[in-house]
Each structure stands twice: as structure tokens, then as C-alpha cells.
């Protein structure tokens, strides 16, 4: 007579369980049982689930931050109560021995155990884990089989792919697997009742309500595979049809699987009702990877800004920066330059400190999630998602690239989260126009202005120019009427960074030298102030009137400033060792 096997398996750690980089296990054997190594990237949604009490299970990512697993995998041992979320770690690895366990792991913030789960007979063996942040962007969730397609007696004989990290030999408790494996079996019987059913050929042993079972004469699941999926196909679509629940001693008798379609309502309720985001506590309360004002749930609240451009970071030519959209805000979603669709995550804004007429190419690489690029024109008070003049919106983790010709109008580059935030690398390359030798601007981006630029040396008006030699001695060394940092010759010097009028028509004393706009020598040579002086030669207005006009040229000083900035079931028990 066969008996139910208390299938608990243990995990071995080389050091304390908190040291994820030191995670290791011992592997022997071939398969789940008679399975093969599973290298299918679409199965990367099947993670290794570890409980710090020493148990390991499998599971399936069914949304970007929810893992479906067995109820006994999330319950405290030998009880029908859920374990603390802090005990769990979820690893999205195909091979635990060659995986970056830090980057590929997620903590858990919420545990769901089916309220009717019974540890005495493993009925209603279904649970879920809400991750602390979305799974890696290269992992695609697998949908659950809907109730309308639930596995029934008409599916007996249908193929099912079972995936897990469990024992490869039911007679050898040391045959743990560090590598994800797959075995294809077939449905032998179905229990569609709220009461237990008997198994054909094993009638002495009832199986739990709302389950199906397989014979395992040729192989199948074993200890450690609990919680992993049984994948089925309907009309060419792969679904999670079953959850590995429990089996018999030595894993040679029937394997029993929770039938997922019966739990569609409970699963969707958990997915759609995450914890409420607190917009001021600095914590990602709902596990979407976005905390406080970076979370769209906080958009429009009094504690959060209504535009991303208020959080300024400067971006200049020939630079590469790294960032994370989770550090931004969630203010924009609908962009006028998109014909359809919305951006549903947080965004990070960069003020473009690039000379007029320069052609800038922005390239976004090393994406952790699906991110997009947008160009918005306007200053930090007027820029909005409706002032979009360019976008790059490739799918998934594809690189983004966007080219923009800088004009006189201020502009922002927005790195936007399509759904979830993530890290990225952003590079800027520029093609500059030739140097204009009389406009007071570094047109070609070489930090040399007008006659100080070698490109202008052959012009008659530049032949006798002697540059200012000392930029902090209080003397007019080149006798041009401008002293030290007021002299454009000094605009590339470190002692002069941050001491220039940034805009020449904003009615502000940007460099706090007591001189505003065109009254400041920094602005004397700009086209805007020259035109204002010409237009007001008979007026006492200095050219800084607040009515009409454009912002005028942005002095290179802005650029310089910016450049400075189972029964117990089939889970397995893992021993800790130090």
C-alpha cells in the first residue's frame, strides 16, 4: 500500500540567508524527474521561491509583480495561516549557480493564502505573493487559465508542461536541482467537485477538490516543485492551468495539481487590490516600483508637483549619465505627439543645456524596464506633455534614440516609464554649427567664444584681440572694458562658473551682480540685447521691457554652469549552514 509522502525539501546556503550573492545549492541528477533543462525564455516567469525558514518552492509570475504559487508554500509549516512577507525572496533565474542573485531577486510585501486552505488535506492549495517591485523587464508574465476554460474531464489526455527546481530522484533527498527543468505529462483525471474525489487505480487515496492529477510512471514533479506551474495551451495561447500541489512517496504515484481556473475570481481580486500608496512616507507601499510622488496613484495630490519639469537636472552635449525613472515624478501620461496610448509610470526630466542650432542625438540603453523618450519645449513653468515635439517609443527593452535640433526656446528631455520604472544609461552626442564670431555665444561647443575661438583668428576684427589673461585679479588685462568674469574670455574658467547672467530677457538678476538682463555685461553681445539697444536708441528703456519678445540667445555661461552639475506538499526543505 502506498502512502502520502511528507515532501519537504531543504535548501543549503554557503553563508547566512541574507547574503544573496553567496547563495548556492548542490545539484545532481537529470530532471524534475526524467525532465530536461528548461532554457525557454518564455518560462523565465517561473521563479525560485525561498522562505527563510528554510523551504523552497516554485511559482509563476502572472502580473509584473504578483507570483502565483501553492498555498502550502506560503503557509507557516503545519498550519493554515500565512507566513510573514518578510520571510520570502523570489529569484528570477534559470540557473541558480550562474545568476546575479541580487539583480534578479525581489522581496515580498504581501502574502495571500486561500481562506479555505486546509493543511491537513492540502485542499484549496493556492497562494500568491506580491513583490516589492516589478520583476525584471525581460520576464514576461504568463496568464492564468480563465474560469471559462477551466480544465474538465474533456481534457483528460491533454499535455501539460510541468516546470520547477525540485528533486531529480524521488529516492534521493540530496538530488536537489539548481537548474530549472521541464517535464511534459498528461492529465489522467479531474476533480471538478467541492468534495474530494478518488483517483483511478489509486482509489484508496482521495484527491483534493478542484484539482487534476497525472500518473508519473515516466516522470513528473517531486519535492521542491510545489507551487510551480502546469502550463496548458488553449487556441495557441499558453496559460497557467495548474499549480503543483502534492504527490506520493518517492514521486512515483499520481501527482496532484490545483486547477487554476476555479480560482480566477480570487486571483483577480488580489491583483486588482494592492495596498494603498502613502504619498509621503518614502516607501513603495503597493509594489509597483514607484514611491510617493513617483507613483501615479499620488498624481494630483497636494504633496506632489503637477509637472515633471520642476525637478530639473541639466543635460549637455557629449555626456553619458545613468538614472532611474523611479527617482522622478508621475505627472505626465498623455503626450500630444503620440497618436494613441498612454505612459503609465514615472518620468525623469532633463533640462537641455545645448547651444542653439546644435543637432543633439539622445540614446537610451541598458534598460531594466520598457522606457521611452520625449522632447518637450518650454521652460520649467510652461513645459507639459502637450508641448511635445519629438518621441521615441520602441517596444519592450529595445534601445531608444531621438534627434533634436536645439532652438532658442528652452527644452526638456523626458525619460518616461511606459508601465514600470527602471534604470537606464543616457548618452548625448552633438553636431555643432560653425562658430559665429560676433554673437557672444560658443556656437560650436568648444568653450571658446567669438574671437577667442581659433576658428575666428583669420578675421580682421579678431586679429588684434588679446584675451583676458587673469580672471580673478580685478584688472582689465586686455583693455576691452570688461574685467575678470565679466569678460567673455573668462567664461570657460573654473573661477567664473555660476557667475553669469543665464537669460537676458527674464527680468531677473541671474548672477546676483546687481545688473539685470541687458544691463549686465554678460548679455551685451547677445543678438537680443543688440537689437533692443538699436530699437530703443531714443528711449530710456534699456531693452529689458517685459512686453513681447523672445527669450533671446542662451549665453554659453548657462552651458558652463551646467557642465559643473502537503499533505505538506511538494516544497523542499533547505538547511542553513555557515
Image: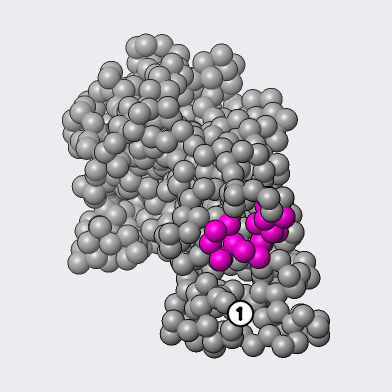
Q: Position of 100 compared to 138: left or right?
A: left
- Identified at 71% across, 44% down, the residue is 390
For residue 414, side relative to residue 23 (left or right): right
Residue 429 is at least partly visible in this image: no
> In the figure, residue 96 lies in which quadrant?
bottom left
Residue nearest the viewer, comparing 8 with 377: 377
Q: Quadrant of the N terminus?
A: top left
| Residue 216 higher or lower than 470, as above or below | above
**Above or below: residue 295 compared with residue 124:** below
Task: Judge by depth and name the residue closer to the eye, 15 or 220.
Answer: 15
> Which residue reaches farthest top?
194
Residue 489 part of the magenta segment: no
Residue 196 placed where, x, y %? 35, 16
Q: Is residue 17 left or right of residue 269?
A: left
Left-right relation of 138 to 28: right
From the top left corner, tell me how far across and down residue 356 is, in percent: 70, 58
For the point 52% across and 16% down, the residue is: 147
Question: Which residue range is magenta in the image?
Answer: 518-534
Residue at image coords 67%, 32%: 336
- Residue drawn 37% across and 11% down? 194
Q: Position of residue 458 (x, y in %)?
A: 81, 85
75 and 434: which one is in front?
434
Q: Give the position of the C terminus as an image quadrant.
A: bottom left
The secondary element bearing badge 1 is classed as loop
Residue 573 seen from this side: yes
Give the percent coordinates (x, y) of residue 60. 46, 38
531 magenta-colored = yes
Amino acid at each position: 500500500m502506498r502512502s502520502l509522502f511528507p515532501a519537504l525539501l531543504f535548501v543549503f546556503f554557503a553563508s547566512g540567508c541574507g547574503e544573496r550573492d553567496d547563495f548556492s545549492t548542490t545539484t545532481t541528477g537529470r530532471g524534475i524527474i526524467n525532465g530536461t533543462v528548461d532554457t525557454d525564455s518564455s518560462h523565465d516567469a517561473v521563479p525560485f521561491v525561498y522562505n527563510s525558514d528554510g523551504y523552497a518552492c516554485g511559482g509563476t509570475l502572472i502580473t509584473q509583480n504578483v507570483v502565483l504559487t501553492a498555498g502550502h508554500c506560503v503557509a507557516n509549516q503545519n498550519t493554515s495561516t500565512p507566513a510573514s512577507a518578510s520571510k520570502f525572496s523570489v529569484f528570477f533565474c534559470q540557473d541558480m549557480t550562474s545568476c546575479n542573485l541580487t539583480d534578479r531577486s525581489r522581496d515580498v510585501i504581501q502574502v495571500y493564502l486561500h481562506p479555505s486552505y486546509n493543511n491537513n488535506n492540502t485542499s484549496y492549495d493556492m497562494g500568491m505573493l506580491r513583490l516589492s517591485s516589478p520583476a525584471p523587464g525581460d520576464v514576461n508574465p504568463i496568464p492564468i487559465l480563465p474560469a471559462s476554460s477551466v480544465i474538465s474531464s474533456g481534457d483528460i489526455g491533454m499535455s501539460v508542461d510541468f516546470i520547477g527546481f525540485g528533486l531529480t530522484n524521488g529516492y534521493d533527498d540530496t538530488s536537489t536541482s539548481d537548474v530549472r527543468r521541464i517535464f511534459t505529462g498528461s492529465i489522467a483525471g479531474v476533480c471538478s467537485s467541492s468534495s474530494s474525489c478518488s483517483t483511478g487505480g489509486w482509489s484508496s487515496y482521495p484527491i483534493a477538490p478542484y484539482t487534476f492529477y497525472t500518473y508519473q510512471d515516466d516522470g513528473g514533479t517531486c519535492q521542491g516543485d510545489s507551487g510551480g506551474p502546469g502550463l496548458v495551451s488553449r487556441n495557441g495561447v499558453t496559460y497557467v492551468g495548474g499549480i503543483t500541489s502534492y504527490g506520493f512517496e518517492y514521486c512515483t504515484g499520481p501527482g496532484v495539481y490545483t486547477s487554476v481556473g476555479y480560482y480566477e475570481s480570487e486571483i483577480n481580486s488580489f491583483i486588482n487590490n494592492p495596498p494603498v500608496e502613502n504619498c509621503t512616507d518614502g516607501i513603495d507601499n503597493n509594489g509597483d516600483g514607484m514611491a510617493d510622488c513617483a507613483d501615479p496613484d499620488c498624481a494630483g495630490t497636494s504633496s506632489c508637483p503637477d509637472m515633471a519639469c520642476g525637478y530639473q537636472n541639466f543635460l549637455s552635449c557629449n555626456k553619458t549619465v545613468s538614472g532611474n525613472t523611479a527617482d522622478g515624478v508621475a505627472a505626465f501620461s498623455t503626450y500630444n505627439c503620440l497618436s494613441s496610448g498612454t505612459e503609465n509610470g514615472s518620468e525623469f526630466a532633463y533640462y537641455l543645456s545645448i547651444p542653439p542650432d546644435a543637432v543633439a542625438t539622445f540614446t537610451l540603453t541598458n534598460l531594466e524596464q520598457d522606457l521611452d523618450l520625449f522632447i518637450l519645449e518650454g521652460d520649467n513653468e510652461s513645459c507639459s506633455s502637450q508641448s511635445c515635439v519629438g518621441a521615441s517609443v520602441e517596444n519592450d527593452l529595445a534601445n531608444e534614440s531621438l534627434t533634436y535640433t536645439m532652438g532658442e526656446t528652452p527644452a526638456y528631455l523626458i525619460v518616461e516609464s511606459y508601465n514600470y520604472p527602471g534604470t537606464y544609461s543616457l548618452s548625448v552626442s552633438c553636431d555643432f554649427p560653425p562658430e559665429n564670431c560676433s554673437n557672444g555665444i560658443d556656437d560650436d561647443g568648444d568653450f571658446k567664444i567669438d574671437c577667442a575661438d581659433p576658428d575666428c583668428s583669420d578675421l580682421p576684427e579678431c586679429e588684434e584681440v588679446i584675451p583676458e589673461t587673469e580672471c580673478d585679479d580685478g584688472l582689465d588685462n586686455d583693455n576691452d572694458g570688461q574685467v575678470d568674469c565679466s569678460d567673455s574670455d573668462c567664461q570657460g574658467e573654473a573661477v567664473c562658473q555660476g557667475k553669469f547672467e543665464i537669460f537676458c530677457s527674464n527680468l531677473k538678476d541671474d548672477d546676483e551682480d546687481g545688473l539685470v538682463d541687458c544691463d549686465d555685461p554678460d548679455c551685451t553681445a547677445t543678438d537680443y540685447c543688440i537689437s533692443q539697444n538699436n530699437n530703443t536708441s531714443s528711449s530710456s528703456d534699456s531693452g529689458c521691457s517685459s512686453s513681447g519678445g523672445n527669450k533671446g540667445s542662451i549665453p554659453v555661461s548657462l552651458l558652463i554652469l551646467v557642465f559643473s552639475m502537503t499533505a505538506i506538499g511538494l516544497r523542499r526543505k533547505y538547511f542553513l549552514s555557515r
